[in-house]
Amino acid sequence: MDPAPPLISFRGVSKRFPGARALEDVSFDVASGSCHALCGENGAGKSTLGKLLAGIDVPDAGEILVAGRPVHFGEPRDALAAGIGMVHQELSFCENLSVAENLCLGDLPRRGLLLSRPALEQRARDMLAAIEATIDVRRLVGDLTVAEQQVVQIAAAVGGGARVIIFDEPTSSLSQHEADHLYALLGRLRSRGTTCVYVSHRMPEIFRLCDTITVLRDGKHVATRAANALDEAALVHLMIGRELSEYLGQKADREPGEALLRVQELSSPGRFADIGFEVRAGEVVGLAGLVGAGRSDIAKAIFGLDAEAHGRVEVAGKALAGGSPAAAMRAGLGFVPEDRKRQGLIAGLTALENLTLPTLAQLSRFGWIRFGAERARAEEVFARLKLPPPGLDLAAGGLSGGNQQKIVLAKWLAARCRVLLLDEPTRGVDVGAKSEIHGLIRDLAAGGSGILLISSELPELLALSTRMLVLREGRLVGELGRGADQETLMRLMAGVDAPIVNRPR
């Protein structure tokens, strides 16, 4: 019996952008009803391929076939008409409009010349019901969680008639609980015959969800294999072209030096209370906790981004003025935020301009930027991060996720900060970039910096941290030293066999 013909076929697809080759002569098939993973390092071409299929970009060469017929999409509306939708990593909504208004924005129901709000809301409810979601359609999209916004994106695709949905890093900003709900929704879609093209850096979910895996490297097709024919080590080798069995590396033994960061009785109403700890030179202090425990809130308060926070923060023995990021930066404190797109980068500026933003005063004379000094500082940091010098003049928004994250880190390397607050520093980056960032964190600590590390990936915390502080419901509930295991850490985070602490008010 002959196998069923593929639903989607890529034949010799190539795409270039100014200064970069995104895809070159890529060919493979996607079977109907499958969940087909696209894997590769940042910049391998995964998202570009998804955008070509979704009609956001147009290939320079080659062709895309749907059910054996060549298609030519000039815009996403054309792709959706052919039954192809996309759920983007970077959510794009009108946040001041309701769920119903966002879902029906392209085709608003009318009664005569006026908008029919009852029909609008009923259509939106029907679209959500089609994927068994129960979100109130009158809520503003800006008030939804990231997970709920992902569900609205999926409802828009399914409601528009999509039988193929491209998921681009859909869980990169979700907690494990939220991700589990998304997995269940994806399972329901597949049971109805929907074909999923799934882009992700998370190995466990790839093997959990996908039956076929295509690997891209440097814009070229490397392999398409059945998921059950690969393990994580083999997949990593295909992605990066070398062995990376120990990419988390080993912790270096060192005696900590002086206290570089000291936090005393730090509180913020409704967020956290009575936080006290210190980070010494040469230490990587992990801050562990479940989503909502207050980890990111504490980092923001230390950096001066919470006007309601009160307490005492010292850097190298000197007190910081509360609510003043400028004072924090002058004291040698750097902050890599959780959301690099909104808080860490200005997408329209070049990589060089982003990199030197915190240090322009040092690189200026009489109010004029010394461009030679600026470029020399940037090139020095780029070399340290193994980034190509031509990338300095590219817009930050056009770089791969891994290179964007390196730029966010590079800002504080250029500023020569002694204390770094790192909030999810490897979120949404591939295994190779993650390895490089881990190496950089270790090098910084070995050089005498003090690092406060926040991560939802427990293996990352356990591998990098000198010791770990555990938060639960806005309060510090324990400290674990080197050698702690993941089960002990998780039990302390969740409050298993321990009294629940009331959330601060």
Image (cartoon, helix red, strand yellow):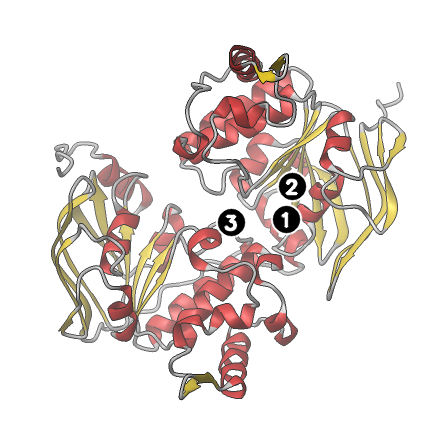
Say which element carries label 2: loop
Query: Earlier along the polypeptide chain: callout 3 or callout 2?
Result: 2
Read off the residue under disc 1: 234
Per the rendering, the mark at residue 401 is none
- Quadrant of image for the C terminus: top left
Q: How many marks?
A: 3
The reply to whether dot 3 and dot 1 touch (C-beta < 8 Å) is: no
Q: Position of residue 365 (x, y in %)?
A: 41, 89
Q: Residue at x 18, y 39 (%)?
A: 270
Read off the residue under disc 2: 230
Identify the amino acid type marked 2.
Leu
Read off the residue under disc 3: 428
Determine if residue 476 is in view: no
Determine if residue 467 is in view: yes
Query: Does residue 443 sit above or below 301 in this rendering?
Result: below
| Spatial separation of the CA atoms under disc 3 and disc 2 | 22 Å
Q: Is residue 293 left or right of residue 49?
A: left
| Spatial separation of the CA atoms under disc 3 and disc 1 | 21 Å
Q: Tell us which disc is closer to us: 3 or 2.
A: 3
Identify the amino acid type marked 3.
Gly
Nearer the observer, 145 or 261: 145
Q: Residues within 10 Å of mark 2 (few under 14, many from 20)?
A: some
The reply to whether dot 1 and dot 2 touch (C-beta < 8 Å) is: yes
Q: Position of residue 244 (x, y in %)?
A: 56, 58
| Spatial separation of the CA atoms under disc 1 and disc 2 | 6 Å
Q: Residue at x 36, y 47 (%)?
A: 458
Q: Residues within 10 Å of mark 1 (few under 14, many from 20)?
A: some
Query: Does residue 104 sit above or below 389 in this rendering?
Result: above
Q: Residue at x 22, y 47 (%)?
A: 470
